[in-house]
Amino acid sequence: MVRGARQVGKSFSVRNFAESQNLQLFEINLDRHLHLEAVFATKNVGKILAEISGTLGVEISSQKSLLFLDEIQATPSAIAALRYFYEELPAQAVVAAGSLLEFTLSDHEFSMPVGRVRYGHMYPMNFEEFLEAFDESLALNRLRSFRLGEEFSANLHERISGHLRNYFFTGGLPEVVAQFVKTRSLRAAQQVLEEVVSSYQDDFSKYAKHSQLLLLQTVLKSVPADIGCKIKYAHLSPHHKSVDVKKAIELLSNARLVLPVWGSSCSGIPLGAQVNRQIFKLYCLDIGFLNRLLNLSSHSDRFREPQLIHEGPQAEQFIAQHLADLSGGTRAPELFYWLRENPRSNAEVDFVVQHDEQVVPLEVKAGKSGSLKSLMQFVSEKGSKVGVRFYGGLPQRQEVAHSVATPDGVKVVKYNLLSLPLYFVGQLPRILEQPLR
């Protein structure tokens, strides 16, 4: 079962997989055939296949074939019926997908086929996939083979940074990227992106009450202004009750349009066990989506200087959506950050990840420099041996020693600082595996 927001390429990927594996594809969009809900409710696999065959006008054979149930959320009984396909007809490969599937799965008003279904989570194209679309094989090979301590070409860095600038404007939604590859026009790509953004908002009526529609629009348009900040409901919509704004955020999260990053004490692993659900930040599905909500374009005066594209919210958004994708689609995204609120000394680390038994703090900087005070505070308190800074410069490793004031006096803390270009985020797990000396 493939899960993900609309327009991330779920249906295309299933079709492409069937073609690449030389499988005959039987595809049915259940949103267009709602009468099949009653048939799936019978849980009779033979009858179900007979009805689908009749609807498609072709006999379904389990030999070298793939049955694709698209928009499966439209017929919830089909989700429960997947169990019986697995048990009674194991030779038949079945893939299901749905753009608003999360809402149906969260209802739990039907028997879930636990242990019978494998979930895959899809996200927008990441930056390395974006480079693949432009046949940047040299850049990809260098990224994927780089080891700490090696030199990285400054010219290659500038070339990749040029692509990164474009990615910030187009984002990774496949239809938008395809338009950019075809036309090499950011303006044309952004026109497609504008249509996609409108379609997301058109979907609100499919999962929200009429009274919630205006609030959903208000919250979604307010999120970009608070990217990277602890969320306060009043900032998102000052004229609505906090409980209503919270519900709107939950709806947008289920639609995968916003990505929450939870505050955690980060005192050990797993990070999720130490989460404070009252403390969180919000990011968008995709950086192109974010910039369209902000009405920013490649022709905006604000972004005429290439270095400005890394500024503030855009850099953090880029890292957030790529961290969500690091699992390779094997699990739903769950991201964390560290916030210490103290009248005398607030401290915040943008993101914190778990790597094996390590808790690794990540700071995101817009340019090639910037204070790492909060990261140092984290390392001092949590005893981390490595910290990561994503920034606009070349990759490097430094052994850092710094003094930190503690209640017991000044303490000298030593750790390894990995400074990596923003576009190295997809290689983070591999780099953390490398020896630090």
Image (cartoon, rainbow, N blue to C red):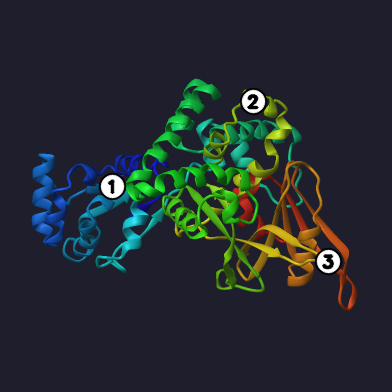
227 w.r.t. 46: above or below: above
Q: Which residue is mark 1?
A: 71
In the rendered image, residue 435, in percent from the top left (x then y), is placed at 71, 61
Give the Cα separation between the discs numbered 3 and 2. 43 Å
The disc labelled 1 sits on which kind of residue?
Glu
The disc labelled 3 sits on which kind of residue?
Lys
The disc labelled 2 sits on which kind of residue?
Ser
72 w.r.t. 277: above or below: above
Q: Quadrant of the C terminus?
A: bottom right
Task: Identify the mark at residue 300; answer none if there is no mark.
Answer: 2
242 w.r.t. 319: above or below: below
Q: Secondary structure at mark 3?
A: strand
Badge 3 vs badge 1, beta-carbon distance below 8 Å? no
Asked which quadrant contains residue 46, the reply is bottom left
Residue drawn where x is 25% and y is 68% of the image: 111
Residue drawn where x is 42% and y is 34% of the image: 198
Toward the front, the furthest residue is 239
Instruction: Report the mark closest to the observer, 1 or 2.
Output: 2
Q: Which residue is mark 3?
A: 414
Q: Classify 10 Å Cα crowding around label 3: few (below 14), some (14-19), many (20 and above).
A: some
In the rendered image, residue 224, in percent from the top left (x then y), is placed at 59, 43
